[in-house]
Amino acid sequence: MDTFSHRFQECLRNHDRAGLRMIPKADLHNHFVLGGSRSFLKEQTGADILPLDHPLASMAEMDDWSRRFIGARFDSPAGRRLLIDATFVQAAADGVTVLEIGEDVWGLNEFFGGDVGALTDAFEQARARYAPHTELRLQIGLSRHCPIEALEEWLRPFWGHPAFYSIDLYGDELAQPIDHFIPLYRRAEAEGLILKAHLGEWGTAQDVKEGAEKLHLHEIQHGIAAARDSAVMDFLREKNIRLHITPTSNRMLGRVPDLAHHPIAVLFRAGVPVTIGSDDILPFDSDVSGEYLRLWESGCLTAGELDEIRCTGLSPRLTAG
């Protein structure tokens, strides 16, 4: 607990989303391209980026939404910087005091002229301008469908740069075997980065354990499939591997039937360390405060349990065993 715990729980019980937004919290699972402020982007571009109004039946629907509302509108250096700005505007409005975001390695040449300094400056300048009280944890992003040889080449400028905190692997979990990424993660480990990967959103509990073991992960994005296997939950708890869970995203992508039965409750009560993040705010229409409130209103977790999760997100990371 911290000095905000009582107030946080009272805001949940009073369904006070505005009050929740004034309380410190972390967002450790945010994809900045889709993680920014809707109102800020409309103010800057005049475009309405409308959220999804129903759970998706396939990823093709998600692609259709992205083409309609994002498309080529931000596909330029100026557009990319605007999306970065929007994410810090959103973080400040939601009381996010620890934010972990970063650019995909392929974006370095596409949007920043191959200059890592220009990339890091874009994030730090946006933080200083829009969210000066937010701690930025800058992340290196890897798209899982990309050829390993391309990832190796794109990663070269990032190695050894002191601005980066973590590395994350995301995209289609079935795009290629996890073994392909072992050499990249061994190098990232040697560089002292926090090792993360998206696992167990579409895959199985065993995929979660296999990926964590082979990549030496400290943290997992999603990981909700682990709730189906007590032995995997024991493994995560014993190794102090933290899961960064995004409940509304899981529901809208059809991974869970409803929030009342979201596996975060099983995981938390089994002692697996978890946090709550936003994932993609623009399509899924839920900031971090909204995630906490929706879980409370669904009856999934108690106010005290949700506060404990909030404090976990703000605490120093749990090292792997």
Image: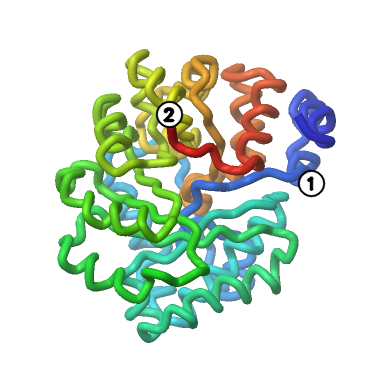
Task: Using residue 60 as the reference point, say whether residue 141 is left or right of it.
Answer: right
Using the image as rendered, state which of residue 295 and residue 3 is in the foreground. 3
Q: Quadrant of the C terminus?
A: top left
**What secondary structure is found at the residue carrying circle 1?**
loop
Left or right: residue 154 compared with residue 91: left
The residue wearing badge 2 is 239
**Looking at the image, residue 215 lies above or below residue 309:** below
Q: Is there a contact, CB below 8 Å, between mark 1 and mark 2?
A: no
At 27% from the left and 72% from the top, the residue drawn is 154
| In this view, the mark in front (1 or 2) | 2
Q: Which residue is tagged 1?
A: 22
Percent x, y of residue 286? 57, 43
- Alpha carbon distance from label 1 to label 2: 33 Å
Looking at the rendered structure, the kind of residue marked 1 is Met
Q: Is residue 300 above or below residue 135?
A: above
Q: Is residue 298 above or below residue 69?
A: above
